[in-house]
Amino acid sequence: MQNKVKKFMVSNIVPLIMIALIICVAPISKLSPTYLIQEMILRLSRNSFLVLSLIIPVVAGMGLNFGIVLGAMAGQLGLILVTDWHIVGIQGLFLAIILSIPVAILLGVMGGTILNKAKGKEMITSMIMGFFINGAYQMVVLYGMGSIIPMTNKKIVLSRGYGIRNAIDLKGVRRAFDSFISLKIGNFEIPVFTVLIIILLCVFIIWFRGTKLGQDMKAVGQDMEVAKSSGVAIERTRILSIVISTVLASIGQIIFLQNIGTMNTYNSHEQIGMFSIAAILIGGATASKASIPNALVGIVLFHLIFVISPRAGKELVGSAQIGEFFRVFVSYGIIAMALVLHQWRREREKDAERRKMLEVQLGRSEL
């Protein structure tokens, strides 16, 4: 019993630390439970699709995909175009998704190909790749749109005649998914249509894991050499996992931005990878294992800290900025801590395996 408790504590140390932190900080913030529950409903519907897009690359053994920012940029390009064409409502969002998917597939193929050249270093490579593609994205948006790509909506184009303004009002598609089907229960408003889209993604992930491709990805994630000897096309499988993740991230960014209602053209995508990875790690995921419950629990815990910490900072020292610093510290610190703990657990597992093999060998020698 004691060993089981110890194993549970070691496996879930990150979410347990976050829960303890929330229990300590929540009373200081003086925020009501009703407000916090409504905020968590809102943030679950806003962020779940993005965080869930991280799962498939983890299954394929490619770690935490910081490259989902590539998909986020593809989604933003789709939103810029539908805003320029004055296509509003749910039709505008679906068109933005359709426009973003080819771009996301192209970026996913390119990203997967690059990551195949950096086996074992996928996470840092995907992060640097995100910075590189960000430069290309800004070149297209700042200089290409209005000069090479015709733009008709003068409200979103810079006064010089080309380039997109820093902030775009998405009033035409604002909360189009959220308000299409919504349900009010007491003080709580639930965006039913958005929740249904997220449930559909969860069902897809569960179904996908059982398919031939899903099993191939699992085999590649467990042992590439064994998978290769079994006839699995390793590099193709890894590329497909990144393509799927990038496409899902493009849809997730569109869902995220329609909920907010405005888009920062040059910055909205930059922290998506960092915050999504921090959320899934807080939920108990690792670089080699992630699940749907990890993603959903992580979003709740991570965003509770996001909501509570500025108010707690204001109550404690009279400055909400302290809380802002704290939540940035948490997001980066959790990623570092989770990766260190993951490596520590791997070393412990290897030591346990070595001891077991040694005991077997000693047993044989005694016979």
Image (cartoon, rainbow, N blue to C red):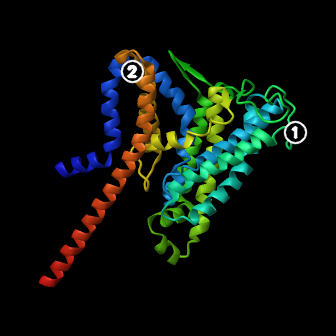
Q: Is residue 1 visible?
A: no
Q: Amino acid at mark 1?
A: Pro
Question: x%, y% of residue 269?
Answer: 62, 39
Q: From what the image shows, is residue 214 above or below residue 23? A: below
| Residue located beneath label 1 in the image | 150
Residue located beneath label 2 in the image:
313
Q: Is residue 326 left or right of residue 352?
A: right
Q: Secondary structure at mark 2?
A: helix
Query: What type is the residue that disc 2 sits on?
Result: Gly
Q: Residues within 10 Å of mark 1 (few under 14, many from 20)?
A: few
Q: Which residue appears farthest toward the front when viewing the image?
A: 160
Determine whether the residue tagged by mark 1 lies in a helix, strand or loop: loop
Q: Position of residue 106 (x, y in %)?
A: 71, 55
Q: Residue at x 21, y 74 (%)?
A: 358
Residue name at image x 31 percent, y 49 percent: 11
Give x and y (percent) for residue 240: 62, 60
- Which dot marks residue 32? none
State if disc 2 and disc 1 touch (CB < 8 Å).
no
* Distance between mark 1 and mark 2 Cα atoms: 47 Å
**Residue 348 screen position, x and y as percent:** 27, 60
